[in-house]
Image (spheres, helix red, strand yellow):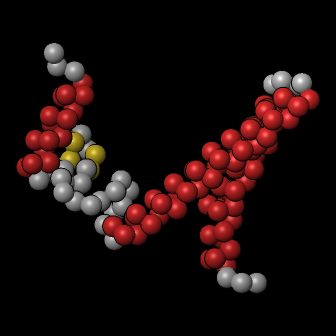
Amino acid sequence: MNSACAFFHKHYFVLAMAGSGSVSGSNFPPPGSRAVAGDEQRSDPREIVRASGRHMGLGLAFALSILLFMGGGAWLDSKLGTTPFLMLFGAAVGAGAGFYSLYYHIVIEPRQRENGPQ
C-alpha cells in the first residue's frame, strides 16, 4: 500500500539525509536544525519559545473569555428560565471580547510600540 503521505515522507527523508532540503521546489530545514517555517534568519530558539508562549497565552485568553461569558449566560438562563438564549448571547459577547483582545495585542499594541509614546 503506497499512499501519498508515505510517498512524500519517504522522498523528504531521502532528500533531507542527502542534504538537499528541497522537495518539489519547497525548502525544508534539514533534520536537527532549529528553523521554523518562515524563519529565514534562524532566530534564537529562546526568542521563538518566548513568542510561541505569548501567542499561546493570547489563544488561551480568547478561549477563556468565551467560556466565562458562556458560563455566565448559562447561569443566568438557569435563574431566569430563558434557556439557551443568554448562554448563546454570552458566548457571542465572549467571542467579541476575546477577538478585541487578540486584535489589540497583535495589531494595535505593536503599532503603538513602533510609533513610540505620543
Which of these two is toward me, 32 or 3?
32
Residue 25 to residue 117: above or below: above
State the residue at coordinates (29%, 59%). 35
52 lies left or right of 116: left
- Picture coordinates of residue 97 (x, y %)? 75, 50
Q: Is residue 48 positioned above or below 4 on the image?
A: below
Query: Taking 51 as reference, is 67 left or right?
Result: right
Residue 39, percent from left and from top: 36, 61
Position of the N terminus by quadrant:
top left
Residue furthest right as drawn: 80
**Coordinates of residue 107 in the picture (x, y in percent):** 65, 62
Left or right: 61 as drawn, with respect to 47: right
Query: Which residue is depicted at the point 64% across and 62% down?
Result: 105
Q: Going 34% across and 71% down the picture, which residue do you hit?
A: 44
Residue at the extreme left of the image, as rendered:
18
In this rendering, position of residue 87 left or right of residue 35: right
Q: Position of residue 80 (x, y in %)?
A: 92, 29
* Residue at screen point 76% across, 84% down: 118
Q: Nearer the viewer, residue 96 or 40?
A: 96
